Amino acid sequence: MRIVVALGGNALLHRGERPDAAVQQANIDRVATALAALAHEHELVVTHGNGPQIGLLAVESAADPALSAPYPLDVLGAQTQGMIGSLLARTLHNALPDRKIAALVTHTVVRADDPAFDRPTKFIGQVYPRELARSLARKRGWHIAQDTTGWRRVVASPPPERIAETDTIHDLLTCGTLVICAGGGGIPVTADPDTGALTGAEAVIDKDLTAALLAEDLKADFLLILTDVPNIYDHYGTPDQKPIIDATPTALRHAGFPDGSMKPKAEAAARFVEHTGCLAAIGALDAAYDIVHGNSGTLIRPELPLG
């Protein structure tokens, strides 16, 4: 079975953790353990988030006196792809010494005229108290918005139109390679309508929507979205919280999940299931094997036919 695995940013750097290299390596060791069991039985494509990492690099770039201007988000996205891709590739190589593994720098094409460029919504970086967030926004020209636990920077997040390296990823899979790609939703680029030339875009693409598009284009059998909770929940964080064991795309869209947390994951799973008729699931990293085998997580399945 061909499975596209989308690792949430919190799988690599948990909320509240210091963004030290050693901390991220320890978390990636857990990732490798969880994915190795799946890789023995299935063909894997692994994508990952980069919100904490790109936020850290953006802060460092903005504060660097040697720069006349901060690095743009597409360049920072490429840096995070290289860093996280290398950590994942090395750790998975150690866990799967007989398996071909490749981390591929990947570009995702978006529309240059997408209205999302005028409405920043994608959270990146760390959580700040309100007054500090406002001060940083004034100083650095950021847009900020309230997250579930505080205030964070938000940037443009246009939906993915296509992944430039899809054919290359397919060729690598055909050779039996476990592919790490489309990290952080892919490096955002626009394409010239006449020449096809690619230009970097000031955005961060939602990694779950890119994973759903990638899974569809690669004709994957299963989309697995891994995060830091064991299920999707109704009324999450309230006394009425209840796990959702399985759902349809329609039911997910009617559930009213928050924009900054479960909503993008639910939408990505719903799109993949609707477009392919295959299955998707959302659950905890450490339960990856059990989720695929129906013993954990929230399963998203096609709508039942009428009549």
Image (cartoon, helix red, strand yellow):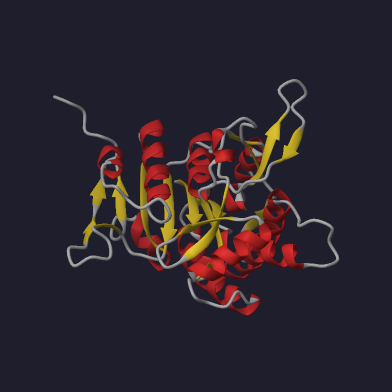
Look at 50% across and 48% down and name the residue there.
121
Farthest residue toward the top?
194
Look at 78% across and 23% down and name the residue there.
195
Q: Position of residue 30 (x, y in %)?
A: 50, 72
Choose top left, top right, bottom left or bottom right for residue 269. Answer: top left
Q: Nearer the viewer, residue 297 or 170?
A: 297
Q: Where is residue 51 in the image (x, y as percent from the top left)?
A: 56, 59
Look at 25% across and 46% down and name the residue there.
247
Q: In screen coordinates, is 297 left or right of 264?
A: left
Say if 176 sits above or below 20 in the image. Answer: above
Quick check: can you spot residue 32? no
Q: In screen coordinates, is 300 left or right of 148?
A: left
Farthest residue toward the left?
307
Q: Which of 107 and 63 is in front in this view?
A: 63
Look at 59% across and 34% down and name the residue there.
162
Q: Which of 263 and 3 is in front in this view?
A: 263
Location of the C terminus (image quadrant) = top left
Q: In screen coordinates, is 183 left or right of 225?
A: right
Q: Where is residue 89 in the image (x, y as percent from the top left)?
A: 64, 62
Quick check: can you spot residue 141? yes
Say if 269 sits above or below 57 in the image. Answer: above
Choose top left, top right, bottom left or bottom right for residue 24. Answer: bottom right
